[in-house]
Image: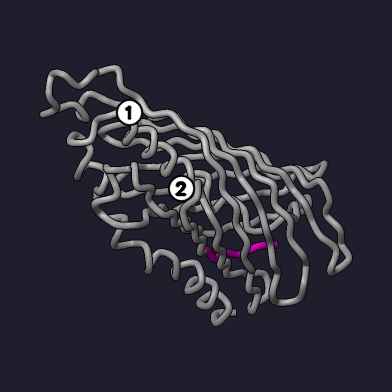
Amino acid sequence: MNRLVRSISLMVALPLFFVGPSLALDDFSNNFTANLNQVALDSLSQDIGAVMGGGSFHTGKALGFPLGFDVGVHVPVVGVQEDNAILKDDGSTTQGLWGQVEVGLPLNLNIIARLGKFYDGDMLGGGIRYGLFSPSIPGLPAISITGLYSTLDHDYFKADTLSANVALSFNIPVIHPYVGVGYDVTTLDLRDPAFVGAPASVSRDLEGESSGYRAEAGVNLSIIPFTYITLGAGLANGQEMYHAGAGVKF
């Protein structure tokens, strides 16, 4: 039993090990005031939306009721767009860290709660997943749809994202493949500290707004019963996207 607990703890900690140092940075602040223009803010909001909507699914099968739950850590990584001058100088990719809890409800409904970090910004989110098809026979596809609301709170801005996902997966022993698509709509409202040191010619009414897509395919490796390691890849708004995660699922 102790060996199982240690193995589960290691699996959940792996994504934290790889992404932890980058989350301690504040790449939002580095080039923010110097790039207060509509193009950069819209592009930033699109990349933020991809991170906030990312990592939100790794299966198409809805959890059962009353004992179904899924507790995991998920790291979405997205490529930074060329027009996103605020983050582009700090690297070609950006990433967030989500802790996610999902609980099964009656009628094939699941409730989702998320808490995370994006550099030194705090993320909070939640939503509902509905299982359109949740077969018990191995090999048949499971399909679900998800609606999520997420928010990012930073000293310079507040971002809000509405996300919709469709995911499909196959219940194959040990390796559980999945594919899915998502769509994110994001607004970025600036706060007064963002304008400190900015020229007077910069409009204080600037805000970012965008929408974009995600497409992802991956596998869940269930080497230890009731646990999983998720590895996925795809595209977000034309840029590369990756998803690493680990957790416990019943």
Query: Which mark, residue 51?
Result: 2
Q: Quadrant of residue 202?
A: top left
Question: Residue at left 58%, top 66%?
Answer: 230
Q: Which residues are magenta?
A: 245-250
Query: Which mark, residue 38?
Result: 1
Magenta stretch contains residue 247: yes
* Amino acid at circle 1: Gln
Where does residue 7 sit, x and y in percent of width and height? 53, 77
* Left or right: 224 as drawn, with respect to 155: right
Q: Main secondary structure of the magenta part?
A: strand
Q: Residues within 10 Å of mark 2 (few under 14, many from 20)?
A: many
Q: Quadrant of residue 30?
A: top left
Where does residue 116 sit, x and y in percent of width and height? 43, 48
Question: Residue at left 50%, top 50%?
Answer: 238
* Left or right: 191 as drawn, with respect to 182: left
Closer to the camera in the image, 114 or 40? 40
The residue lying furthest to the right in this view is 137
Q: Quadrant of residue 225?
A: bottom right
Report if residue 243 is visible in the image. Answer: yes
* Amino acid at circle 2: Val
Mark 2 vs mark 1, foreground winner is: 1
| SS class, disc 1 | helix
Q: How many numbered marks does the figure carry?
A: 2
Where does residue 175 sit, x and y in percent of width and height? 69, 74
| SS class, disc 2 | helix
Question: Residue at left 61%, top 64%?
Answer: 248
Q: Classify the position of the C terminus by image quarter.
A: bottom right
* Left or right: 235 as drawn, with respect to 172: left
Q: As displayed, is residue 160 above or below residue 244?
A: above
